[in-house]
Amino acid sequence: MLTIWGEKQRFCDGVTRRGFLKIGAFGAGLTLAEMLRLRASAGTASSTKSAIMIYLPGGPSHMDMYDLKPDAPKEFRGEFKPIPTNVPGVQICELFPLQARMWDKLAVIRSLVSVDEHSDSLVMTGYSENSNRIAHHPSFGAVVSKLRGSASDIPPFVSLRGSTVGTEPGYLGVGHRPFTPDGPGVNNLRLANGVNTKSVVDRKSLLHTFDSVRRDIDASDTMRGMDTFAARAFDMVASGTVRKALDLTHEDPRARDRYKGIEPFLTARRLIEAGVGCVTLAIGGWDTHSSNFKTLRQQLPQVDRGIANLVQDLYDRGLDKDVVTVMWGEFGRTPKINNSDGGRDHWSPVMSALVAGGGLKMGQAIGASSSRGEHPKDRPLHVPQVLSTLYHTLGIDPGQTFPNGNGRPMYILDDREPVTELL
């Protein structure tokens, strides 16, 4: 079974990357009503498109997944063999048979350049963690939260992996931090013992009366509108929409069986169907300095099943044009196998990323690495270009600016050239 990203997951540098400020469902000690008020402090635009961002923490091996080199020397090519997909000329790992049969619904980028740091910052914000320490650029999901908005009872941004560096909202403000449904997040969606929906409605009416009185005596008028945000918070709890999406017992048992052991893929699909604008999740541990092939023999079939089920479900539900999915880690692994139990070390000069849906052009492999998988051979691309493409897909202009904490206008992305082959 795949490892689900948790508190005890650590990389080779000994740092726990599951974040900080996890006080309450949204962090920072904010109540649900306060979070909704902060989100609405600026106007939001609606959009029907959504995104699922799958993060493979630790750096998955491009050489053993989507960019195999069967003609390279043994110390490079590794243990796995490539198999053909249903798109002529495209081959992927033999442990990905389900994806191979549906490659017309998928695409891979094989020439991505990254940075050598154990962080989700680059792939989630477009900026490395080191460069983000000062500028505080927002995550992809936070931008979606800012511009998309949502129904009153649906959070626009959900992180199934808790709060991390890459999920932070930066200068967009804590109002766009993701809803994290584990622990306090789920508890905040439940009605207290002995409280039913009718009681909540009565309480809403009572609070509305109190708020009206407070507005009448509030000379500065600062209380005006607070009842609206409190009502939205009540709606999120009382409607139960998010809670039901997170409760997999509401899913068809046959579907639950297909996703057994890879439940985050199913949860992500259910949240998207419920109306969430962006869902992030993390699967497995990929920092394979040793036992690379042993680890991948366990994890790759699970990823194959997760991706195949998720993408096919989205197609079957008519959501393939409206939901874009991306799967990647922070970097690739060394093309040459090291001498420590068949491992591969960090390798940022080139990595691969999987993309699906969103109305993008599928059934292709974009770019290529060198014969030993060491560097881009043609069409070198950078992570912000992929994010720019995803923003375009969701109808968001990556050249839009927002004021930072000092009032200076900041671009969502500095490198905004999209991956034109996908458009």
Image (tube, rainbow, N blue to C red):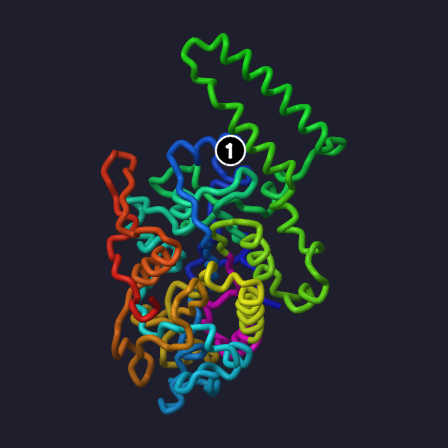
Q: Position of residue 341 (x, y in %)?
A: 48, 79
Q: Position of residue 338 (x, y in %)?
A: 40, 79
Q: Position of residue 314 (x, y in %)?
A: 54, 64
Residue drawn at 25 percent across, 77 percent down? 378
Residue drawn at 33 percent across, 66 percent down? 423
Q: Residue furthest right?
A: 194
SS class of the residue under badge 1?
loop
Q: Is residue 420 left or right of residue 86?
A: left
For this rendering, which residue is in front, 148 or 21? 148
For this rendering, which residue is in front, 278 or 318? 318
Depicted 172 relative to depicted 10: above or below: above
State the quadrant of the N terminus. bottom right
For this rendering, which residue is in front, 83 or 135? 83
Residue drawn at 60 percent across, 20 percent down? 207
Instruction: Tell me, yes or no, if residue 152 can be seen here.
Output: yes
Q: Which residue is mark 1?
A: 29
Q: Residue furthest front?
A: 318
Depicted 325 relative to depicted 278: above or below: below
Q: Position of residue 275 (x, y in %)?
A: 53, 49
The stretch drawn in magenta includes residue 320? no
The stretch drawn in magenta includes residue 296? yes
Depicted 217 relative to depicted 34: above or below: above
What segment carries the magenta color? 281-300
User: What kind of residue is marked 1?
Assistant: Gly
Count of numbered badges drawn on the protein: 1
